[in-house]
Image: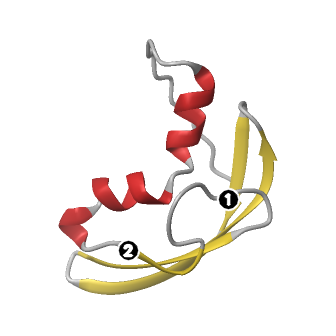
Amino acid sequence: MTVSFVCRTESVLPREQLFDRARNIDAHVDTMAASGERAVAGVTAGLIGAGEEVTWRARHFGVPLTMTSRVTRLDYPASFVDDK
């Protein structure tokens, strides 16, 4: 089953700056502090790019989780695809 959605966000920031925030490992870690989410392998800080992976560890609803994502497509500054 394929699922898709559209999320529209308006901002005064330049498109490039918003795009870089969306793929910034450090920013993600900061916003997920409550779950203890952290990058443990691959790109663990800074910006993730095409062909790169990050492995995350976290605890959500009391369940420990490990997940690896790879950026399979990147069209700067329009879109990127990360597959899990």
- Residue 23: % across, % down: 57, 50
**Residue at the front extreme, as displayed:** 46
Q: Residues within 10 Å of mark 2 (few under 14, many from 20)?
A: many
Q: Secondary structure at mark 1?
A: strand
Name the image quarter holding residue 6: top right
Going 22% across and 75% down the picture, which residue do you hit? 61
* Residue 1 visible here: no
Q: Is residue 50 left or right of residue 43?
A: right
Q: Amino acid at mark 2?
A: Arg
- Residue 67: % across, % down: 52, 79
Q: Residues within 10 Å of mark 1 (few under 14, many from 20)?
A: some
Pointer 2 with pointer 1, Cβ within 8 A: no
- Residue 74: % across, % down: 78, 47
Q: Is residue 62 left or right of residue 9?
A: left
Q: Amino acid at mark 1?
A: Asp
Q: Nearer the viewer, mark 2 or mark 1?
A: 2
Q: Is residue 69 above or below residue 62?
A: above
Q: Is residue 15 above or below residue 28?
A: above
Nearest the viewer among 6 and 51 is: 51
Going 25% across and 74% down the picture, which residue do you hit? 36
Going 39% across and 51% down the picture, which residue do you hit? 27
Q: In the picture, which quadrant includes the N terminus?
A: bottom right
Q: In the picture, which quadrant includes the C terminus?
A: bottom right
Q: Is residue 74 above or below residue 65?
A: above
* Residue designated by label 2: 38
Going 24% across and 70% down the picture, which residue do you hit? 35
Q: Earlier in the sequence, mark 2 or mark 1?
A: 2
- Residue 8: % across, % down: 50, 23
Name the image quarter holding residue 83: bottom right
* Residue designated by label 1: 82
Cα gap from disc 2 to disc 1, whole angstroms: 17 Å
